[in-house]
Image: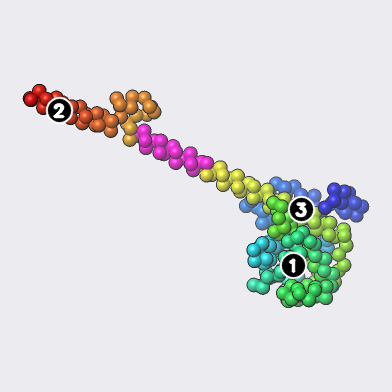
């Protein structure tokens, strides 16, 4: 999005509650807040429903994540096992899909997409990719069921704005999860080291490291006593000779 897009006349700001919620969201609340953001997109663009999909970079499948629909509108269904490769090829390069008249706007090689959207009863759809950590791995889709709709540049910028918020929230939650995981590993290592240190202290019979190892360490005492006994026996043997 260009830096001045949001100051463009007619851009308008979305619900002001959406931005701070997504920017402060915790990992355990991400799904609920993302659904609220999807609802905000539907209401902001005056569409019928919207959904979020995860794009698998290996299989190129679009995996359904979550959705929101207006009252009386059927929810978005997950795609079947057939990969929506025409969609994912476009979205994986950062392309935006503005399909005003479905299924007529789809190319001939988008057979799987045609079947999926016809099954959904979709008349038009706008799909924008969501970038996370430099990769287009999510997609935000909205559309209409009652009638076709031409998508304007302004519609696209508005949808991209929500996609940017969603991508930033996902990235932030991933960073927090990684940090929490690292801190947990450090804590576990500290506990293990403390336990091993305590075991060694008990085994050595002292609470002070490196102090009086020979004088206080029971294993060393036993070794020392055995050695002294050997020396006394050797001395007696020498004297007897």
For the residues marked 2 and 3, what is the alpha-carbon distance in whole angstroms?
85 Å
132 vs 97, left or right, is left
The quarter in which the C terminus is drawn is top left
Q: Residues within 10 Å of mark 2 (few under 14, many from 20)?
A: few
Task: Name, please, the residue furthest toward the left.
Answer: 240
Is residue 109 found left or right of 153 in the rendered image? left
Q: Mark 3 points at which residue?
A: 164
Query: Farthest right residue?
Result: 9
Can you identify the residue that label 2 sits on?
A: 234
Between 115 and 222, which is closer to the camera in this rendering?
Answer: 222
Task: Please check the rendered image and state whether residue 127 is part of the magenta-colored stretch, yes or no.
Answer: no
Callout 2–callout 3 Cβ contact below 8 Å: no
Magenta range is 186-202
Does residue 220 appear anywhere in the picture? yes
Q: Of label 2 and label 1, which has the lower sequence position?
A: 1
Quarter where residue 141 is shown: bottom right
Q: Residues within 10 Å of mark 1 (few under 14, many from 20)?
A: many
Callout 1 secondary element: helix
Q: Nearer the viewer, mark 2 or mark 1?
A: 2
Outermost residue toward the top in this view? 239
**What's the residue at 11%, 25% (across, down)?**
238
In x, y percent, where is residue 58?
Answer: 64, 63
Q: Nearer the viewer, residue 234 or 199?
A: 234
Mark closest to the chain's N terminus, 3 or 1 = 1
Where residue 93 sits: x, y (%)? Answer: 75, 60
Which picture quadrant has residue 195? top left
Vertically, is 197 above or below 184? above
- Badge 1 is on which residue? 87
């Amino acid at each position: 999005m260009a830096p001045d897009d949001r100051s463009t006349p007619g851009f308008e700001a979305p619900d002001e509650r959406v931005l701070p919620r997504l920017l402060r969201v915790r990992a355990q609340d991400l799904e609920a807040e993302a659904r609220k953001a999807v609802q905000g997109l539907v209401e902001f663009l005056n569409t019928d429903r919207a959904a979020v999909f995860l794009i698998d970079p290996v299989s190129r499948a679009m995996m359904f994540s979550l959705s929101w629909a207006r009252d009386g509108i059927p929810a978005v269904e997950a795609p079947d096992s057939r990969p929506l490769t025409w969609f994912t090829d476009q979205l994986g390069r950062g392309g935006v899909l503005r399909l005003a008249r479905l299924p007529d706007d789809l190319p001939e090689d988008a057979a799987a997409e045609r079947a999926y959207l016809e099954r959904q009863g979709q008349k038009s759809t706008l799909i924008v990719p969501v970038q996370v950590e430099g990769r287009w791995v999510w997609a935000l889709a909205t559309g209409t069921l009652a009638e076709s709709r031409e998508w304007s540049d302004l519609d696209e910028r508005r949808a991209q704005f929500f996609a940017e918020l969603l991508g930033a929230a996902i990235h932030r939650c991933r960073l927090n999860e990684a940090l929490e995981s690292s801190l947990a590993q450090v804590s576990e290592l500290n506990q293990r080291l403390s336990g091993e240190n305590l075991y060694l202290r008990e085994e050595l019979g002292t609470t002070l490291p490196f102090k009086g190892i020979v004088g206080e360490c029971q294993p060393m005492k036993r070794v020392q006593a055995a050695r002294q006994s050997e020396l006394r026996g050797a001395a007696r043997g020498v004297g007897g000779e």
